[in-house]
Amino acid sequence: MRGLNPFVLLVSLVLVAPAVSAGVAILRTDYYQKTCPDFNKIVRETVTSKQVQQPTTAAGTLRLFFHDCFLEGCDGSVLIATNSFNKAERDDDLNDSLPGDAFDIVTRIKTALELACPGVVSCADILAQATRDLVTMVGGPYFDVKLGRKDGLESKAHKVRGNVPMVNQTVHDIHGIFKKNGFSLREMVALSGAHTIGFSHCKEFSDRLYGSKADPEINPRFATALKELCKNHTVDDTIAAFNDVMTPGKFDNMYFKNLKRGLGLLASDHILIKDNSTKPFVDLYATNEKAFFEDFARAMEKLGTVGVKGDGEGEVRRRCDHFNNLNV
């Protein structure tokens, strides 16, 4: 058989090679190595200072990142403030308890980066990197953060519902939201382990404590303590309880151990140990922290790639809470 003419082979390869859209984001860990060489250092130093000042920052930022990625992808759309033209994601009822410290850490990092390398680093990348650094600071696993996201051009409050899990949903419904973002049931349970840090407001679990529909499966002593804590929650909606009552400031597998003891705070937590499809993963992570950390790290890497925007689909905002075109 005669060999192919090299020139003909080259032309053939060019013709059949798939075209890459200009809008596709190509993420890599060293994205800012040349354009903003101090990026890693600035993020790390800023989150360290903030976490020392306010220890709930890690949990809040992790939650903010999740809420950002599950609606319109990881594009910083949750950071946008409402204006006279638009009610933004962060002002939907389901997002009204997103903590101010999480927004603040993004603003602090953005301010520092704009001084070092103006107009280079997206707010979406700042949130992703800050989340990883904060998780590791409180004892969680390290995972790679690939960078190069652009900031989204839309943030609509009315799109939140149906894209963010709710505390009273079934496992089937919650997994439906995860599944459309590409996550398996096991990955859903692993990501739920983020509740090993942070807190929830009483209004999110009070229906498990009071009245005829009180949940009898809550640990009795835990229920008594929560009732006392939340007794005035209808007049003070800032009252909250730790998601993990045992080690609230440490990222570990205690969340899963708690579920087996009736110490799950939210109905959506407790249901993971009750449902036959998710219980095996709860049992695994409760006894094997290494397996939880490995699965959580992989799921977080995957989460950071959901719906990312590339050139032509987004921008690098000058301020994280405003589009560059203020009339959007």
Image (cartoon, rainbow, N blue to C red):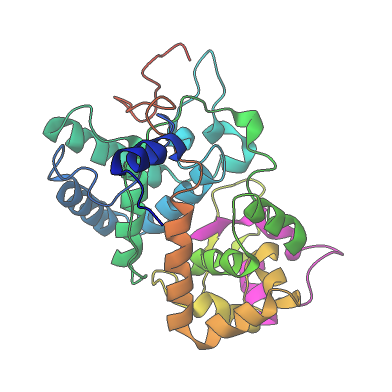
Residue 216 falls inside the magenta stretch: yes
Q: Quadrant of the N terminus?
A: bottom left
Identified at 84% across, 64% down, the residue is: 213
Image side of residue 77 versus residue 132, left or right = right
Q: Determine which quarter of the picture holds residue 36.
A: top left
Q: Position of residue 328 (x, y in %)?
A: 48, 15
Identified at 76% across, 61% down, the residue is: 172
Q: Position of residue 112 (x, y in %)?
A: 18, 37
Image side of residue 320 versus residue 224, left or right = left
Q: Determine which quarter of the picture holds residue 313.
A: top left
Image side of residue 149 versus residue 168, left or right = left
Image side of residue 122 versus residue 294, left or right = left
Q: Is residue 265 above or below residue 283?
A: above
- Magenta span of residues: 198-227
Q: Residue furthest front?
A: 1
Residue 15 falls inside the magenta stretch: no
Q: Is residue 107 above or below residue 52?
A: above
Q: Position of residue 44 (x, y in %)?
A: 21, 54
Count of numbered badges drawn on the protein: 0
Q: Is residue 8 above or below residue 306?
A: above
Q: Residue furthest right?
A: 212
The residue nearer to you, when weighing 187 against 132, is 187
Identified at 37% across, 28% down, the residue is: 311
The residue nearer to you, when weighing 255 against 99, is 255
Q: Position of residue 73 (x, y in %)?
A: 51, 41
User: Does any portion of residue 232 appear in the rendered image?
Assistant: no
Q: Determine which quarter of the picture holds residue 123.
A: top left
The residue nearer to you, when weighing 175 against 19, is 19
User: Does any portion of residue 235 appear in the rendered image?
Assistant: yes
